[in-house]
Amino acid sequence: SSRDPAVECSFSLSVLEVYNERSLDLLVDPRTAEARRVSKHDLPVRVDVVRGVMVEGLTELGVEDEQSALDIIALAQSNRVVGVTHANDHSSRSHLIVTVYITTTVRSTGKTHYGKLHLVDLAGSERQAKALTQGAADVESKHINRSLSSLQDVFAALLAKEKHIPFRNSKLTQLLQDSLAGNSKVLMVVTVSSRVEDARESVASLALARRVRSIVLGGARRAVENEEYTRIQKDHQTSLHERDDRIKLLQQQLVTALGAARAGQVDKTRRAASVAGRKAEERKASDVDRAAIERRCADAENDADRYKAQCQLLQGQLAQQHVR
């Protein structure tokens, strides 16, 4: 809602943790959160034309007042990974990012403005020799230190005004890209310990704060759903429809081709059967002719034997007459 009748506003909230270089949704049932953590579940990150960096599949709940937002954050905090180390009894083993999304629509023009507020709780860097972490806790420490080093590399590149900023070197810097890319306002709070044994870490934190303080990001800009974005979105939808139509046409052509192939195969089978039938009939006729010829040959041989016997008989009779 909004106090200005000419403007309509809505708020929503999401909470995630960066645990061992993986994005995990914390607005879920505790058993689901633990199962996803064990199965190495990771939510993909993409960049939206208007709303900037977005996490696919991340739960986003609407909020109406301050208390509902605090209740959601409390639920998420209960799902966050917390461990015990030699240096801290309640050590956060992940980075926490609470994001408030603001959508404002001007009723008279229909233009929509998007805003985003990140509240980030960074896990503290750890020295293994001091924290005495082992096993899974040691792996968590290495990921925490590596992501914090990547964040410092981003700060260094921003301070040097380099053309390439290494946002993609870690999941943390990738998620904070649109907050550190020069179109947002950023406030960083550094906490240090007053204990003498933590002096080394405190000095390092203060040195980082001094470097960050020198970075100039520029002013925040409005994210407006303008005519250009609408045109791009419309063109994209048109290309999707054209692709779907093309797929349907190809499917129809495939069905037609398959039908023709089947019909051709049936016709080929029929022709083969016809040829085979004709050959069988020809073989049968040939066998009949051969049998007839063989019978005639046998009859001729019988006639020849009979004629031969008659000739021999006549020759015998002639010989007897000659003797007389």
Image: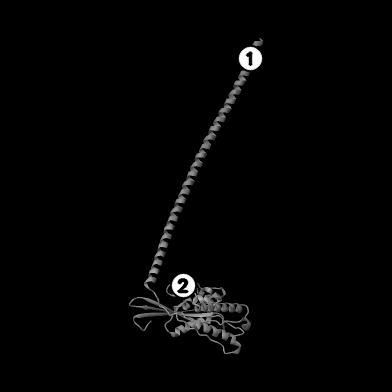
User: For the view shown, which residue lies furthest in the top direction?
Assistant: 324
Q: Position of residue 139 (x, y in %)?
A: 60, 77
Of callouts 2 and 1, which one flags the residue occurring earlier in the amino acid sequence?
2
The disc at residue 128 is none
Q: Position of residue 240 (x, y in %)?
A: 42, 64
Which element type, helix, strand or loop, lies under badge 2? strand
Q: Position of residue 162 (x, y in %)?
A: 50, 75
Q: Is residue 17 left or right of residue 228?
A: right
Using the numbered discs, state the Cα–Cα distance from disc 2 to disc 1 in whole angstroms: 127 Å
In the rendered structure, which amino acid carries the disc numbered 2?
Val
Q: Which residue is at a point 57% across and 75% down the rendered structure image?
A: 38
Which residue is labeled 2 in the image? 47
In the rendered structure, which amino acid carries the disc numbered 1?
Gln
Which is in the foreground here, disc 2 or disc 1?
A: 2
User: For the view shown, which residue lies furthest in the left direction?
Assistant: 108
Viewer-closest of 196 and 232: 196
Q: Which residue is at a point 46% across and 46% down the rendered structure image?
A: 267
Is any part of residue 253 visible from this angle?
Answer: yes
